[in-house]
Image: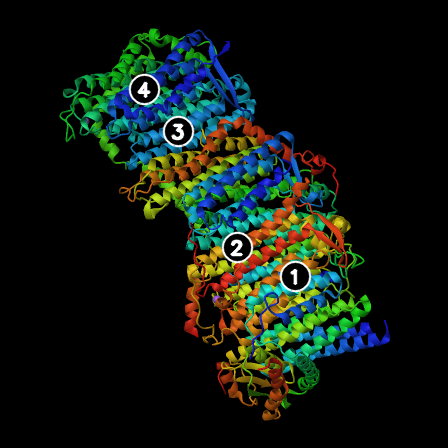
Amino acid sequence: MESSPHMNLLWVVLLPLIGTLVPLFTERFGRNICTFSVAILPAWSLILVLMFAGDVFDGQDIRQSIDWIPSMGLDLSFRLDGLSLLFLFLILGIGLLVILYARYYLSAKDSMGQFYAYLILFMSAMVGIVTSNNLIQLWIFWELTSISSFLLISFWSHKSEARKGARMALTVTGAGGLALLAGLLLIGNIVGSFDLDTVLANGDLIRSHATYPIALTLVLLGAFTKSAQFPFHFWLPHAMSAPTPVSAYLHSATMVKAGIFLMARFYPVLAGTDLWFMIVSLTGLTTLLLGAYIALFKHDLKGLLAYSTISHLGLITLLFGLNSELAAVAAIFHIINHATFKASLFMAAGIIDHESGSRDMRKLNGLWKYMPYTATLAIVAALSMAGVPLLNGFLSKEMFFSETLNQSTLGSLSWMIPLLATVGAAFSVAYSLRFIHDVFFNGEPIDLPKTPKEPPRYMKVPVEILVTLCLVVGIFPAYVVGDLLNVASFAVLTHEVPIHSLAIWHGFNIPLFMSFLAMAGGATIYYNRRHLFEFQSHFDETDAKHIFEGIIQSIVIASQRIITTLENGSLQRYIFLLLLFTLAMGALPLLDLTQNTGSRPQIPIDGVTITGAILLIMSAIATVIWYRKRFLALIFLSVVGLIVSLAFAQFSAPDLALTQLSVEIATIILLLLALFFLPQNTYKESSNRRLSGDLLVSGLIGCVIGTICFAMLTTPLSTISDFFIANSKTGGGGTNVVNVILVDFRGFDTLGEITVLGIAALGVYKLIAKMRIYMPTRDDKGRAWSNDPHPMMLEMVSQSLLPLALLVSVYIFLRGHNVPGGGFIAGLITSIAIIQQYIAHGVLWMKPRVSIDYQWLIAGGILIATATSVGSWFFDKPFLSTWFDYFSLPWIGKFELASAMLFDLGVYLTVVGAVMLILANLGKLTTSERIHIKEND
Amino acid sequence: MEAIYAFCVGILTTCGFFLVLRGRTFTVVIGLTLLSYAVNLFLFASGRLKLDGAAVLGQSAEYSDPLPQALVLTAIVIGFAMTAFVVILAMRSRADQGNDHVDGHIPVKTTKSRISEKRHS
Amino acid sequence: MQHLPILPILLPMLAAVFMLLPPLSNSITRHRFFAVSVMIILVIVSATLLLTSHQQGTQMYVLGGWQPPFGIALVADRLSTMMVLLTSLLALGAQLYACAGDDHDGMYFHPLFMFLVMGVNGAFLTGDIFNLFVFFEVLLIASYALLIHGGGKQKTKATVHYVILNLVGSSIFLFALGILYGTIGSLNMEDMANKVRLLGEHEQALAKTGGLLLLVVFGLKAALLPLHFWLPKTYAAASAPVAALFAIMTKVGVYSILRVHTTIFGEDAGALASIIIPWLWPLALITLTMGAIGVLASPSLRLTAANLVIVSVGTLMLAIAMQREAATSAALYYMIHSTLATGALFLIADLISKQRGKAEDRYVTARKMNQGKVIGIAFFIAALTVVGMPPLSGFVGKILILQAAQGMAEIVWVWPVILLAGLACLVAISRAGTTLFWRSAGESTNYIPISRLKLAAIALLLSASPLLVMFGGPVTTYTSLAAAQLHDNKAQSAYTILPKGDK
Amino acid sequence: MKTRPRFRLLPMPLHSLILFVVWLLLNNTVAPGHLLLGAFLAIGIPLLTSGMQDDQPGFRKPLATLRYVLMVVGDIIVANFEVALLVVRSSKKLSPAFIAVPLNIEHELPITILASTVSLTPGTVSAEVSEDKQWLYVHVLNLTDEDELIASIKHRYERPLMEIFEC
Amino acid sequence: MEFWIELVVSVLLILGGLFVFIGSLGLAKLPDFYTRLHGPTKATTLGMGCLLIASMIFVTYQQGYLSVHELLITLFLLITAPVTAHMLAKTAMHHELDILDKTSNKALSQRAKERMSP
Amino acid sequence: MLSTAIVIATILVCLSLILNLWRLFKGPGRPDRILALDTMYINSIALIILFGIASSTTLYFEAALLIAMLGFVSTAAMCKYILRGDLIE
Ligand code: NA
Ligand code: NA
């Protein structure tokens, strides 16, 4: 069969999709215009389909494809074959009827635009599913039906049942959707393409592949959840809290049929195996029986119809599962028939509900008197459901019975299938009878909110059309749906459809006998319903909603328990885990280290080093021993800092020694400032077990780090550093290589580093700005503070030292490029000198004397450093390219000017600004000079 | 010499991490400071140890690796900035929550033991 | 134009600095106009950089003219420019949202915000591992300061945890860098990659420690289990625009793992090839699982969004663990999608919590929202996106990752976990949505209409979701090229594209 | 007393001089470039910091100052040997004491210098100055005669200081 | 190096070391805080002076130019040591540290603490 | 001779540092500990000077100068802390 590219096929999907937006705009023009406008685009789409129909009936599949996401195997790809055509008629045709019906069903309070938008969205999704020629695209539309049905079911979102029902439907179909996705991906992987044509052409490949059972199961999970097959059937009755047009559409004709469609679509590649038979037919059979049985006991009209739908879907599934071609044809036929009679039944139920205010069959009685016309329509449809001759339901049921007789996969138990099918049919008759008798006859209505009457004229039109179809198909099957059934079956079977005759009369045969049995049995069951009801009342009615919610709830609670146990909000635990992880990462590779000592010659030990080590180790341990006495810990910390600086000095890093020293003092001042506001000592909090655990882990990490450090120190290394030494003077213009690296080779790091400092200062300022903190009036031993806030000697000496300190910082700054020093250290010296003034004199004394905006200083510093770096752009060099030259002036002699100095000035200013912003403002916390949050503008 | 150096780094690391694992902000800050000493020494060690080799041209015969020194300088500055922030954060936490526990509240267990401790004394 | 690669770092930095100086300082109005203008310019610059790098090949920017491995070089390849563009887009959204008033709850919002963007962009662009550390610190310190923006007990508490953990992380970072320099002797990642193969056995063991310790560091930033505990409460406590911007922060960790562990410890690293992979598999799976459990357990939308971040991290890590071009490409697509979507979700959560009175965004019955419809639409789009339902971008990323796993033995773990996590998210989000929007008691009061700016910000971020699907073709083409570039060590080698210049 | 005169360019001439000298000390040089730079700094830094200096009586007598300094240095050296002996000896032989020295000078800077001198010299440490600046409390390591010690402090150090500061 | 210079430097070094040591010894062994305060503030200062002068001479000789910048350290120490001692004494009095029993005029420390006249 | 002198002086300074550490541990009061720390600062200046002479370099002079300047600030700050709690008021 040739496929012809057809550019208009896309519009079949696009038109409804665009139509989704229409009601949102036309809602304001009134109900009729809104309804009409909503119908236009789907109708147009249907017309397009009808125009294509001829080609399809002629055996020409229509295809259209556009590239979309090739790396995912996703193309925008459509095809129209017989199966699609059949479904499109159902979706668009019944869809249009539902649009009309809903016009009268919805009350003035309901948002019509929203409803139609959801409905059309759903319709588009269904159209998309049935026309998709790409597996992933099919899945996209599949999921879209889940989403839009969620919106439709929860349309009356203020009702708890609506929300829960919608959620349940979404969860179940969503889960199925994920399974389907996995299945489709597997199939795509087997075939090497997600193109449906390719997939359908490779049935044998798929069936023989090792992952076939998994792929089959996953795809069927998708189909069964969507089509409410046992054990996933429970969501469907709860979806009945949707407005009735939704039920008529989604739960009879379309969405639940999506699963059936999926089975039909993949019938050529997945069916035909025993596994398929076992899963599909048994699931179908169980669903058929269960649905039919429960339907009888539902007092809610829509509940009855819902379980009836489940039962009929089971029937169709069973047919597909039988692995017989005629059965598949029967299944397709029953899809049509079920759609027509069930949609009309739902609509009738909706009319009854709408006009009487109740759906409870215990209250609804004798409606024949009040709405004879509607009653007639409903009774015809119900009889079709029961499979009464002359109605379409009878035809497909006959085919069904005959197919149940033609299978033998269950071996000697195969006889059970026709028997159980008959039992199911009997119950089907029984609940149909109940629907007819209990609602339209059976005495007078009880306590109805409204007096029932016939509905508006046009509300009946959709029902009339559908019931007429039931009759016409039932009487002239071959003329009405013969061709359609043929092309659809052809699409499913992918070859010539086996001979079947669509006729009312096939002579006296076993299926007819089974039908008769079912009729009689159904009547008997209904007649004796009181006993059955009594029997059934012994069982607690298990509400699926409660079970489902219960399961979800317990999952949520379990999750919460897990989360609260693990995420207990204890930082100590988080750090402990972090350290454990670190330990694992650090220690395990070390197991590969055969020996710790490398080949690098070691430096002999000397006494000074030992002294330093003793000081360092003892002090470090002292901070641990006395960590609860904070001031003490602080003093020992200072010792550690001092020794570290000395170590840098010893190991040839004078710049580091200087920096470490100045940072260390600034840190101590900072910690002292903060300690004032914090408890001075704390109780023993950690249990001994925790302490030893912590000690163990930190000790082990210490061992790991120490080992690595030793191994590293004793291993020879060649680095890129020779370059720096070689180019420091010639390329960077300075003899202090470390400084040249900082301001030139790796000036970018330095720029980042001063930015960090600047940001930290801003952050601190931000922290302080909103701080309201308690100021202790006594020290930790209860002593009142000394009465001398500004000791005179300290004041005198501090202010005398200030110019000296500034001089030293200029000295350190200027020499940095060539010998140890530089902007950072100079900046810290300046800041500490100024802080010393604050300590000695206090904020009030300082305030009139220092009028620098530290914030500007920070910004200015970073700006100068950046501007210096950007300056190189004007010489067509990259950012941070430095410049230096030597000049000589008479008398003064030769001197160097370098852009790096300017960069370093930026560093200096930022450091001063940042440190002062932090420390000086922290000091102001307790005075009247505390920061007031600036009001803007 | 290398062994002693590595040992000191190990001790500092141990002490630092142990204090970081404590429950009070100030102690944690002390721990972080110790840890940053350890880190700086360690990072410095990546250039190996050298005596009399300051990387100032013309001052030594052989130069120590200047690059780790520059890295450590950056690390020191950043460490200082971070310490400054976390110290003030500790204060802010005390101000906002009324205690200086890292979790913003004293664990129930501790409160109990403290009461019993008081009772005993 | 030759300076284009450094502009994503310089622009926000200078913008921040200028905002601290007169005439911009102390005027929130001026801050807003200036900051938004700069951010729009930044978006344009980033896009230009991306196109340049895409069409003309990787752009190297050699700072100070010092050739790598001696100097620091910025590497603007497809991956880094993509991340930079992503950052500026997210930042623009978050910033617009903040301009509606949240920026006024404390000081320095805009400068700090700019500094954070600078740090993130720097981390993405730099080709030097120590410079990466520096930019990590820039973005961290800015994030610390931003986290307390707005004040309040919760923020303070979350900040304490966040800051201390990250400080420990920074220490470990430096330990790792020390080890790497101490064994490899270089800092330029490309140069390290070349040298790491040649290491002796002794050095290898040490370098491996360094590489694995980096996993700890990046894992902490990325919120990889068991280092993720800080994330939910931190993100939930942050003010909305900050939380939205933080959506990129975990991605910095993910990016770093991707960059460092495919460049330095990639397939060509000899004995040190793929050292993190045996760890990454289980950790990624558990992260994803815990994220999903967290999503189920979340009692409020902000926590849900935060846990969704963990889910996305777990998913990304799985893709990285696969070590395939296809998987990396999928990860990159997923990264763009999840960053913008979770960012938007944080903003939406804020809108919701401001309209529900004391209930805020918790999943309890509360008064009806004033503008439930418009927020509802935004939420619906965001929810579909994060859950991975078509037709929005989530499903593309998920399918790409699932597809990438085909043919691997680990598929038996990857597929079920990813799919079930998706289901858990679906369950949780549908519960969340129905509760927040539909379970209401009492009518709304205090009608304060939502600022249009906020809606525009959310729309901006959300618009990415359909666009990513619509233009899925070009986007995935780009991500696969980026992935190919990342995996092909020779193609991205710094030396091949460098003109052998002077100096 | 006289406060020091204020010049616009040289607010603290003595400071400037000290800074200039210190600059040369620091750089170990008298190169012309450094002379110029030193001069610049010696003028610039006091201009910057003059705000942070309280008014204090100025040094009037350079010679007396020099004499005082030399005397103190000598005392320090001698005193230290004494203290060294005291430290090394058994501490049982110590006779420590607190004493209060009445002060005649009133200004903060001279008092500070006096107290510093006392601290640097034999066996005495200035512990406190009373709030009214009338008394200097001194801790003595090994007191032999209280009155003599007080007299010697006043005579040896306070008087020259009063002379130097003309107060 | 010339013998005399070497001798002077060596003597100064040993002397300096000795004073530094005695200062610390005093700190370690003297019986109460106030007596301990004397050691470091004075002996150490002198010791440092010796060492710095030794360094001055040594560097001047070795480098061939006058190295006087060590004087600056001495200057700093001379200026700051008394203030340090003063501040420490204040803290000791504030904490009312135990004073050696045989100290005369112990009560003065109370007056001093309050900064009142005796 | 000179090298012997340097060694002797260094040993003396190292011993001093150990003595300082001992006082630091022993206390008993906070002032004792601060005093010990301050002495340690000064003794480390001595160590640096000796180190400079021993390795005949002037590179470490600034370190000594810095300790002299900043050690004082630190000690003063600690004393102020004990006296007033609040460093800057
Ligand atoms: Na009835
Ligand atoms: Na204060």
Q: Are marks 4 and 2 in contact (CB under 8 Å)?
A: no
In which of the image's four quarters is ligand 1 placed? top left
Q: Chain of mark 4?
A: A
3D distance between C-alphas at marks 1 and 2: 22 Å
Q: C224 and C438: which one is in front?
A: C438
- In this view, the residue farthest toward the right is E2
Please say if D135 is above or below B17: below
Q: Which residue is labeled 4 in the image?
A: A37
Judged by depth in the image, the label closer to the viewer, 4 or 2, is 2
Q: Which residue is labeled 3 in the image?
A: A146
3D distance between C-alphas at marks 4 and 1: 82 Å
Q: Which residue is labeled 2 in the image?
A: A855
Question: Is C285 on the left-hand or right-hand side of A481?
Answer: right
Q: Which residue is labeled 1 in the image?
A: A810
Classify mark 4: helix, strand or loop: helix
Q: Are marks 4 and 1 on the same chain?
A: yes
Q: Earlier in the sequence, mark 4 or mark 2?
A: 4
